[in-house]
Amino acid sequence: MAKEGFKLNEICEAFLDKAMEIYDVPSVALGVMVGDERFTGARGYRNYLTKDPIDKDDVYHCASASKMMTAMGIMKLVDEKKIDLNDRLVDLLPYWEMEDERCQRIKLYQLLCHTSGMHDVPVEDWEEKWSEKVVDPGSIKRYVTSDEVMKGRMLCEPGTGGFIYSSIGYELLGAVIEETSGKLFNEFIKENCFLPAGMDNTTVLTIERTDGSLELEDIDKLRMAMPHERDENRNFIMAKYYPYSRQHAPSSTLTTNVADMLKWGRFNLDRKAFSDETYDKMWQDYATVPNNGEKMGLGWFMREQDGHHLIGHEGTDIGFRASFWMCPELDMTIAVLSNVSAAPVKRINKAAFEEVTRSL
């Protein structure tokens, strides 16, 4: 229960003003929900070079926050008993088998919590990853059977190396969704995540916003948040590409705004997607993240702050950062989006949590 006189809008407006003074970013969008109260706001520029102001409803690329949706899709199929968390990946994808024979022992839950030992796309290859602009419906299956995946060497025996983050593992989960459901990944996620949550401005299929063009000038005309980087003098410049390739949708291509992310929070805090038993499995600790001590559930990270338990996911990509966290105990959700590489969105999210909870 909030204290008498609790004014979420005033708290968040003041916080946004302060955040833009402290953090050097082209823009920041903030969504905060406490119970039935909601705030959405933004500061800065959608396009820093043209000084076009950001609007609170403008759409951002959210990178690895996409993995929450993929995990929810898998857990929906688990809840419906169409697949099992202990199923072997090679049994779920009859057309798939890496040259590394250890792949035969990868289980579904290990992909979800990043303990499969699967390798990943190196950070230095991200620019090439987004320059490909793959858009056809068969791209996920084609990618998981490409040489990059099939001839790659696993980093360890499944289940023995602890937490090893792998976006490739999530492309494989997207392939499992398509193989099991008989639907395209974007269609299944829309039907089972976005529509039930009321997220009408959210997609993993960015090209449906753009009539098929991924050129920056066409993205700009749609008034989407534009991707920025920094030059050698730390000045903001436009990124070379908008980060989209359909083959990476299960790991990386969510686009949305903070209002819809609050709907995502409400949908999951109310446990609307599937049974309580399945939610409990999803939010159980499966691994420890070595660099920060956070715990890893099935597609969701878990951390502690000021004595409270939070569940969520970060997103990092060329030109964008996203931070989404829920606190079930306080019935609270906080989403922070920004449009520059390495924006300190998690730090902003933590500061917003501290600011709001201080007034509860």
Image (cartoon, grey):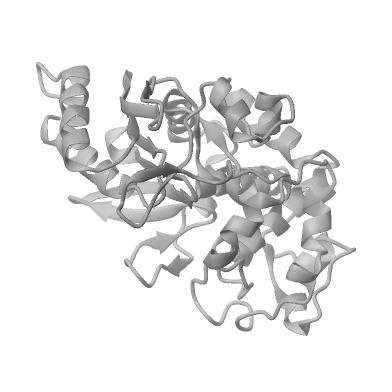
* Residue name at image x 63 percent, y 51 percent: 130
Depth check: give the residue in front, 331 or 239: 239
User: From the image, which quarter does the N terminus lie in?
Assistant: top left
* Residue name at image x 58 percent, y 56 percent: 127
Is residue 199 shown above or below 87? Answer: above
* Residue name at image x 43 percent, y 34 percent: 269
Query: Residue 19: percent from the left, percent from the top?
Result: 20, 36
Seen in the image, is 231 located left or right of residue 99?
Answer: left
Query: Residue 234: percent from the left, percent from the top?
Result: 31, 52
User: From the image, which quarter does the C terminus lie in?
Assistant: top left
Is residue 251 shown above or below 16? Answer: below
Query: Residue 51: percent from the left, percent from the top?
Result: 36, 25
Residue 31 can be seen in this image: no
Depth check: give the residue in front, 68 or 281: 68
**Farthest right residue?**
95
Figure quadrant of residue 94: bottom right
**Farthest front residue?**
233
Is residue 223 shown above or below 261? Answer: above
* Residue name at image x 59 percent, y 29 percent: 217
Figure quadrant of residue 173: bottom right
Is residue 239 shown above or below 189? Answer: below
Query: Residue 223: percent from the left, percent from the top?
Result: 51, 21
